[in-house]
Image (cartoon, grey):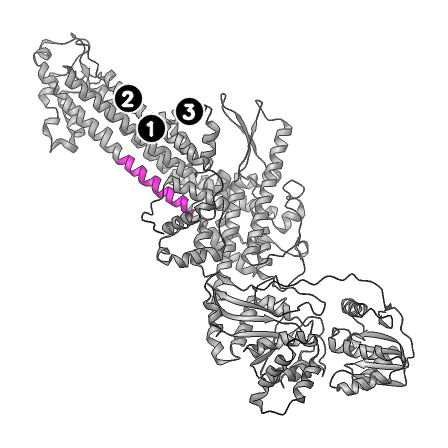
Amino acid sequence: MQIKNSKISIKSYLNLLELLNEYRGTHEENRLFALKHEALLQNPKKMLLAWMQKNEFRKTQTLESLSILQKLSILGNFIGLFSLIFGFIAGFGLLSYSGHAPVNVIYYLLFAMFIPLLSMLVSMVSLLSSGTVFNALSLFFPLHWIETVLNFFSFRDKVDVVNTLFSDELKKWMFMSRLQLFSLLFSVGLLFALLVIVISKDIAFSWSTTLNVSNMGFFKLLACIGFPWGHTLPSAIPSVELIEMSHYYRLGENLNTQMIQNADKLGAWWKYLAMVTLFYAIFLRFLLWLATRYGYQEQLEKDFLELDGVQKLLREFNTPFVSTESPKEEKHLEIVKESDEQVSHAVAKVYETIIGWNFSNDEILLVNDAKGISSSNISTVGGNNSFAEDQKVAKEARAEVILYVKSWEPPTMDFIDFLEELLANDNVEEIQVYPLGTVGRNYESDEREVAIWKRKIQGLKSKKVWVIDV
Amino acid sequence: MYSSKESLNNDYPKFAVVGHPNKGKSSIVSSLALDDSVQIGDTPGTTQVKRGFPLKVDGKIIYELFDTPGFQRARRVLSWLNDQEPVSADKKGDVVRAFIAAHRDDERFIDEIELLEPIMNGAGIIYVVDASKPYGSEYETEMEILRWCGQPSMAILNLIGEENYTEQWKSALGHYFRMVRTFNPIKATFREHIELLDSMSQLKEEWTKPIKVAIKVLEDLQQQKIEQTVDSIVSNMVKTLSYIHRQKIVGESATTDEEEKLKHSYREKIIKFEKEQEQNIESIWNHRSIEKVENMLVLDNVGLFSKESASIFGLSQQQLIITGASAGAMGGLGIDLLLGGGSLFLGSIIGGAVGGVGAMMGFDNLYEVKVLGQSIGKRELTVGPMQNLNFPYILLGRSLYHSSVIAKRSHAMRDNIDLEQEEFLTEQIIDSDMRKTLEKVHVSLRKGDEPKEEDLKAYKKVLKESFLGLL
């Protein structure tokens, strides 16, 4: 699998988001994938893209968000074209020259420099702000209102769906990037209009203001504005002479004779205006557009890595998979219902035979004393006894037998073997298995321990053997 | 899933956990294997066949534990072994192998073969006894059989009940085992778990290195689990506290019914977030079979802000006022900074006072329902982000408490967790300095802003510290 470019696009962002909604893989699968693509471990974005590519087939839902986004992109192109045309029309409007009143360069400068600079400044402040401040500032942008109006069309709900997929920060960068692009296109339209008019019409420029600005003062201001290109293109800076020539007074004649005489010279303004548009409205806007594109891409990549599930995936790629599970399934035991079958709630005082399983003789005597039980025939079995000794005890047992067992030691098959030998003795009429607790607890046995003994004895299905539960 | 190499490389330490029935063998395996899928029961014979629990790192087995059935006919086995021609000590293992070969199809010795087989295949012996019950000479038969196997061995004293016969057991086991350790799988901490592994590594020289590797792996894993737990808590806090629930409404203003419905859905969503987070924590710590007896997180004035809930997980009124004051002061500080401190920090003082009073007033106000919309657009009713000052601490307290119980819980434990019986005070684990750090993030979330990265980092640090304090 080759991932040449690790640049994240909005498409890959949405693809991963939708894939993660449906499939995230197990730690084992993801670690195995990472081990197979060890070279990509240092580049999480590439690794994620490769993982996405490998698992893309798992997606069962169609990418509605992508198709909506495509439609929005077409809409964006339309707005872009509209901005370009609007800029061109606005340029035509600004530069319309009827042959009576000359075109005031200050109007043009307002649109080609002051408004773009102000808009760029607000854009930058917006970029640095967030939340309410950003929302408030965005009200100043026409794009905000265009998008708001568009939101009331039928596809509003769909736009809402797409909006929920992006973080506010990413939406901010998207908006600002679009804003810069559309403004750029507007300015290109404006410049285009200037060039078309200059070529196709004989246009007279002048400058006029109510403020008391001297020709020299105005020259200095214009020279200052034209500083970026003043050295390389001096002809695109209006001379003091030109400024004097084109100073226009509202209260005078429409055009004074001097201006008419120098009409060919008045047109020299266009170079300056073109450069102002090119530098302030286009070049600086282009730089800001590049910066917002960069910011948008950075934010997109940041959000890509912050998508729900991505951090877990990355952790699983980088963390050795440790497992301790058994590959073998365990057969679960059937739970036997508790019953009172073959359970005796009383202990007799005298038994024909007393046998202690894993008890010593002394221990049996102590139990007898504590419980007030007696017998003339006391034997020990189990423990270190040999099988022959146990068999002898089983054969010699008579009538009613009480069999002491340690309640905490569950019945083993060794015990069952002995019990079966005892049951096989016809002289034995009844066997009472008595589970006893520890000496420390005065032979009191635990309910749960006795239950184990009961279940085991009941499982033998013999009517001759009982469990004492007192 | 990885490669079949693991089956070729069989040269890793193996340990067979053996003993009398019902002495906690499966509990020990479950605890050491960090796996709560092991069936543990009080009925002898719960473990019917041996089950291997390999510790695998990226598919490579580091060591393997075997859970085995208990001895059932130990006396018969020993009797058979003794009946064979006498052999020197180095050949005794062969006699055990001969026993396995001779009785493989003998139903009477299914359990013994299941437990002896891994030992004769090279597994070390971990003999488990219940030291809360007295020693009996019948155990000597089992220990004698294990001695015949000639494998490295150790004994574990597992205190299942309340009585203690440790000394009695120690003097008996000392005759058969080089190493005797006490380990309670139900109560064992992570450190005790590692210490036991360390003891196991000393059974055989060749095993020391791989077990040390395993210890390192488990320690790293523990650290990762802690990090993941803290991340999970923080992400749930951010998600819950910033959550805004929206609902479209038809009329000019919301009806009471619409408002109630919205509040209900909001509550449900927050409960769902908490449940998801809890499940995430349980899966991080490999506890998949937990059933909890826990009250639901009821987000209304009676449940969540009842005296009990607030006193256990939330802050006291006094702490709340102090926290509210510091949160308010943070807002006020913004004014001071804007004025370059020219306000003589009056902004902070006034902000603090307003915040403090707000905290008192806001104690019962969980919701702030807003109607949003424009005249030509559809109207929306929204609730959130969470405005209550105490709620973050209640949620955080609950998360920390739940996570610490899960993290400490032994995989051998099968009882339900009764959260209601535990004692826990958020105030005890989060002091006022910590609260200041936490509050920075809470304030941002309350305002609907994204918290700053450095604030979130500090938030995580504080939570990690608190979480470690609970472990």
CB-based contact (under 8 Å), mark 1 and mark 2: no
In the image, residue A433 sits, relative to residue A395, either above or below, namely above
Residue B85 visible in the snapshot: yes
Q: For mark 1, what is the residue? A: A77
- Graded by Cα atoms within 10 Å as few (under 14), some (14 to 19) or many (20 or more), the crowding at tag 1 reads few
> Which secondary structure, mark 2?
helix
Task: Tell whether position A290 is magenta.
Answer: yes
Q: Magenta span covers which residues?
A: A287-309
Does mark 1 fall on the same chain as mark 3? yes
Label 2 and label 3: CA atoms lie apart by: 19 Å
- For this view, does A124 lie left or right of residue A438? left
Look at the magenta stretch and give its main secondary structure: helix
Mark toward the viewer: 3 or 1: 1
Q: Quadrant of residue A425?
A: bottom right
Which numbered dot is residue A85?
Answer: 2
Q: Which residue is found at the position 75% from the left and 87% from the top?
A: A386
- For this view, does A134 lie left or right of residue B364? left
Q: Quadrant of residue A249?
A: top left
Q: For mark 3, what is the residue? A: A150
Query: Residue B456, how many percent across, how many down?
Result: 45, 49
